[in-house]
């Protein structure tokens, strides 16, 4: 590695001459040695990055006064990652870049991005985003810049150890009281989505896991359901997306109550009696009157109508999962058992539920 006049390392192919100018040089793919001199280190580094990119990839599309993060991302996602990872991963990369990274870094030159800029991206997500989504953004940032570094476009990856995941600001998740739960189920009893609501309140599965459940995943003899996939509707592409569970811990077997088993058997009997189902969805458990799965957003819209009629505050589908966990804690279930049932990747997530429920219980006792 070259050094400046003070002995500080400047990176491969860069050095400072005795007259103060900076030298940038490299050997092209054809074996030709190329060298240029610049008044500033930044200019030398920018030229080197762009020249090596042009030489290595043979594209003038990326050549301009400076290579922006926007341009590099598109090249990286299409020509490098697009051929080596699953479509779901590509969609995740694009979503994280579009919604979280681009507004902060998109117009910056690739060589100008520093650790503090990457930290700002993550800090901006601390409020309103789940920790897992922030982590996905960090992974996207690291992979994006690491590829640029390994291809000689930047002298180092700006996503260093100093770039930390911020602690997300998480609002207390709504939990239904026993009374509200009974009111809700009574109101939902005759609705088309009642089996789905009842199922989550008895199993604690995520909405996407419930939508993706197939009959082959249910062992009626043992009273066990197996979570093997998640499913959600992507409005951007107008299609259903089927993928693996949220984490490796998401692959799990869950015991079901006698009431839940009875409900599922009744649902299966109705389908076997000739309810219309689109062929591609015939293996799925929860199918609507149109013969296909119900979209994620449709459930929340339906919940709002039901809660209004039941005279209770509105809530989301995630509230049903959280309510199941709360009822388990109140019944004395051990943390490790609940962690396995919920598919939490970290026991601390489960323990936070225990702390929250205990605090709520102590507060009720104090008021009484």
Image (cartoon, rainbow, N blue to C red):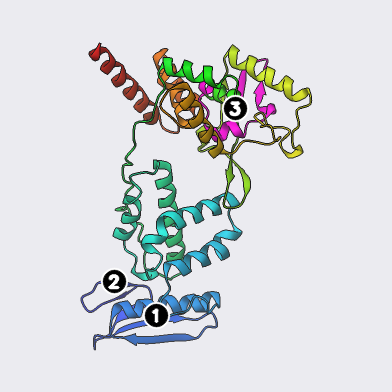
Figure quadrant of the N terminus? bottom left
Q: Are marks 1 and 3 in contact (CB under 8 Å)?
A: no
- Residue lying furthest left: 6
From the image, tell me which residue sits under label 2: 9
Image location (x, y in percent) of residue 82? 58, 59
Image location (x, y in percent) of residue 38? 32, 85
In terms of depth relative to the viewer, which is nearer, 345 or 363? Answer: 363
Going from the N terminus, do you reach mark 1 or mark 3 first?
Answer: 1
Q: Which residues are magenta?
A: 201-226
In the drawing, what numbered circle is on residue 185? none
Q: Residue at x 24, y 85 (%)?
A: 20
Marks 1 and 3, how far apart in space?
A: 61 Å
> As displayed, is residue 231 above or below residue 160?
above
From the image, tell me which residue sits under label 3: 193
Figure quadrant of the C terminus? top left
**Can the viewer see residue 86 in this picture?**
no
From the image, tell me which residue sits under label 1: 47
Q: Residue at x 45, y 60 (%)?
A: 144
Assign a secondary structure to mark 1. helix
Total numbered labels: 3
In terms of depth relative to the viewer, which is nearer, 162 or 275? Answer: 275
Task: Answer whether residue 206 is magenta in the image.
Answer: yes
Label 1 packing within 10 angstroms: few (<14), some (14-19), many (20+): many
Marks 2 and 1, how far apart in space?
A: 18 Å
């Amino acid at each position: 590695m070259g050094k400046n006049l003070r002995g500080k390392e400047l990176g491969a192919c860069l050095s400072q001459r005795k007259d103060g100018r900076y030298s940038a040089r490299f050997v092209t793919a054809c074996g030709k040695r190329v060298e240029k001199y610049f008044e500033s280190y930044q200019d030398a580094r920018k030229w080197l990055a762009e020249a090596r990119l042009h030489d290595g990839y043979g594209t003038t599309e990326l050549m301009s006064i400076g290579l922006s993060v926007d341009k590099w991302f598109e090249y990286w996602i299409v020509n490098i990652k697009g051929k080596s990872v699953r479509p779901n991963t590509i969609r995740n990369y694009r979503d994280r870049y579009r919604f979280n990274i681009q507004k902060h870094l998109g117009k910056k030159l690739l060589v100008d991005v520093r650790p503090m800029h990457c930290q700002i991206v993550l800090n901006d997500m601390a409020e309103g985003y789940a920790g897992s989504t922030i982590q996905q953004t960090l992974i996207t940032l690291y992979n994006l810049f690491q590829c640029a570094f390994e291809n000689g476009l930047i002298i180092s990856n700006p996503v260093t150890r100093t770039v930390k995941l911020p602690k997300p600001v998480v609002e207390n998740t709504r939990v239904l009281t026993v009374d509200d739960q009974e009111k809700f189920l009574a109101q939902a009893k005759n609705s088309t989505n009642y089996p789905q609501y009842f199922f989550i309140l008895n199993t604690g599965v995520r909405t996407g896991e419930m939508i993706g459940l197939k009959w082959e995943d249910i062992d009626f003899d043992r009273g066990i359901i197996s979570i093997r996939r998640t499913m959600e509707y992507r409005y951007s592409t107008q299609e259903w997306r089927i993928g693996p569970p949220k984490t490796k811990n998401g692959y799990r077997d869950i015991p079901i109550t006698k009431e839940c088993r009875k409900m599922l058997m009744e649902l299966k009997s109705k389908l076997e009696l000739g309810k219309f189902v689109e062929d591609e969805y015939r293996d799925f458990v929860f199918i609507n009157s149109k013969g296909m799965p119900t979209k994620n957003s449709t459930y929340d819209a339906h919940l709002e109508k039901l809660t209004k009629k039941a005279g209770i505050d509105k809530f989301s589908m995630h509230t049903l999962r959280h309510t199941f966990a709360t009822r388990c804690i109140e019944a004395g279930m051990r943390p490790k058992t609940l962690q396995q049932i919920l598919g939490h990747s970290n026991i601390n997530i489960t323990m936070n539920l225990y702390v929250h429920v205990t605090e709520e219980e102590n507060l009720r006792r104090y008021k009484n």
